[in-house]
Image (cartoon, rainbow, N blue to C red):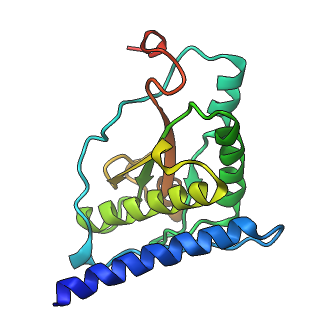
Amino acid sequence: MKEGRMKVLKVLGLVAVVGLSLLSANCAKKITKVQVMPQAKEEVPQIAKPAPSTPTDSFVLSEADSMLKEALKPVYFEFNKSDIRNEGLSQLEKIGKILMTRKEVSLLLEGNCDERGSEEYNMGLGQHRAQAVKAWLVSYGVAGKRLETTSYGKERPAFPNCQDENCHAKNRRVEFKVLAGSIMSQSHVSR
């Protein structure tokens, strides 16, 4: 019975996030933060690794692909949060505009955390961050099937062994990888 209630609460929470995302996309100049709260430690979902598709970091770039690569800069998050900050919203808008014109592009959204906290908690938080970014892009009009999410938790810090908050802040991010085959043939993917 308790497990059934938890599933209902999770579904209601997801519906609320998507609803808020759709509402924020319809507001002209008003910026609304999308907040997806991390689940309690006992409810953190298990994340399967590796991601189902293969991302590519480097490939032969056309002029349009150079614009895409330039737009795919990380979105950063506050400590222990998965809500999208104003700076992240402007970055996501750039990405959304490109994805709306480049229908062949699919992305892997990689959620990351700083090195503090347990591995299990950070895996869940990283997934919530990736899902918040996906929800925003879907509310912008990007087809959800073009966006895959995964979490690396604290396993892939951009700056390992941080000692101060400025360093930790650079690790709390969602990164974007173009999924191989979505914009180029396999012969263009670096080996």
- Residue 43 position, x and y percent, is 24, 75
Residue at 65% from the left image edge and 52% from the top image edge: 92
Q: Nearer the viewer, residue 148 or 47?
A: 148
Q: Nearer the viewer, residue 147 or 84?
A: 147
Q: Quadrant of the C terminus?
A: top left
Quick check: 87 above or below 29?
above
Asked if residue 159 shows in the view, the reply is no
Quick check: 165 above or below 49?
below
Quick check: 175 above or below 118?
above
Q: In which image quadrant can residue 126 be found?
A: bottom left
Residue at 51% from the left image edge and 36% from the top image edge: 106
Residue at 22% from the left image edge and 61% from the top image edge: 46
- Decide if residue 38 is on the left or right side of residue 44: right
- Decide if residue 98 is on the left or right side of residue 188: right
Quick check: 7 above or below 169?
below
- Decide if residue 110 is on the left or right side of residue 47: right
Q: Name the residue at the left extreme.
A: 1
Residue at 24% from the left image edge and 65% from the top image edge: 120
- Residue 95 position, x and y percent, is 66, 44
Asked if residue 137 shows in the view, the reply is yes
